[in-house]
Image (cartoon, rainbow, N blue to C red):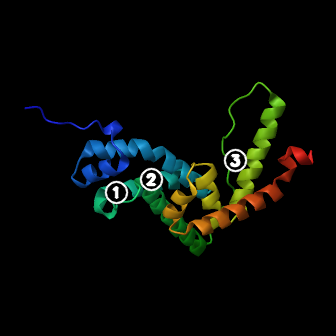
């Protein structure tokens, strides 16, 4: 008799969560390998690029999954659920930071740019990256998180709504406001104005 062994890399996230709830370590390892880096990047974008704090947040999020795997509703998308948890963790961290009056406003520019042979283009792109990060950092958390989920993490409007537990109309409104605000403050990078 041959025992069925799942090929973890081919299983959908939701099935892996069912296996995690049954204590399957390899299923957890697969979910961790899929989501640890994207979630770390998400935290880095929202939490002023504090690497140590972001690593702790990823660790805490996965510890929650281990301790309470049954919190996840298998009828939902795991991806939107895990980003919903991450978003709530960021909101709680913002509250703690506000209470401590220790809010940092010095986001370092994200490294969006790969090395290029065209130095002028690289300088322009780096300048845009710096300015974008600066403007995102000035934006309130509600608008910033919608913009980041859409344009950096590739979420659909529906996935953003589920992750942030808001309706799609609110997502569209916040995204429109964030995009309009950034377009105004970053218009010097638009070729039309050059």
Front label number (1 vs 2): 2
In percent of width and height, residue 174 lies at: 66, 65
Residue at which label 3 appears: 109
Residue 155 x, y percent position in the rendering = 55, 52
Q: Nearer the viewer, residue 181 or 170?
A: 170
Q: Nearer the viewer, residue 143 or 172?
A: 172
Which residue appears farthest toward the bottom when viewing the image? 99
- Going from the N terminus, do you reach mark 1 or mark 3 first? 1
Pick out the residue farthest to the left: 1
**Mark 2 and mark 3 in contact (Cβ < 8 Å)?**
no
Query: Looking at the rendering, which quadrant does residue 129 occupy?
Result: top right
Does 79 sit left or right of 188 as displayed?
left
Secondary structure found at label 3:
loop
In the rendering, at what x and y percent does residue 127 appear?
A: 79, 44
Q: Secondary structure at mark 1?
A: helix
Judging depth in this view, the residue of 186 and 79 nearest the camera is 79
């Amino acid at each position: 008799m041959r025992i069925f062994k799942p090929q973890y890399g081919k299983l959908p996230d939701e099935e892996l969560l069912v296996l995690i709830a049954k204590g399957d370590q390899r299923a957890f390892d697969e979910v961790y390998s899929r989501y640890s880096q994207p979630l770390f990047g998400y935290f880095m974008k929202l939490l002023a690029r504090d690497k140590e704090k972001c690593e702790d947040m990823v660790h805490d999020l996965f510890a929650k999954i281990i301790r309470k795997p049954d919190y996840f509703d298998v009828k939902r998308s795991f991806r939107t659920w895990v980003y919903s948890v991450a978003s709530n963790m960021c909101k709680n961290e913002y509250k703690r930071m506000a209470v401590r009056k220790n809010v940092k406003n010095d986001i370092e520019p994200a490294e969006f740019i790969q090395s290029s042979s065209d130095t002028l283009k690289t300088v322009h792109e780096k300048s845009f990256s710096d300015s974008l990060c600066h403007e995102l950092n000035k934006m309130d958390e509600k608008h910033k998180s919608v913009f980041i989920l859409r344009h950096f993490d590739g979420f659909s409007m529906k996935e953003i709504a589920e992750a942030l537990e808001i309706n799609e109309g609110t997502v569209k409104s916040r995204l429109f406001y964030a995009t309009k605000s950034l377009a105004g403050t970053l218009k010097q990078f638009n070729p039309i104005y050059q």
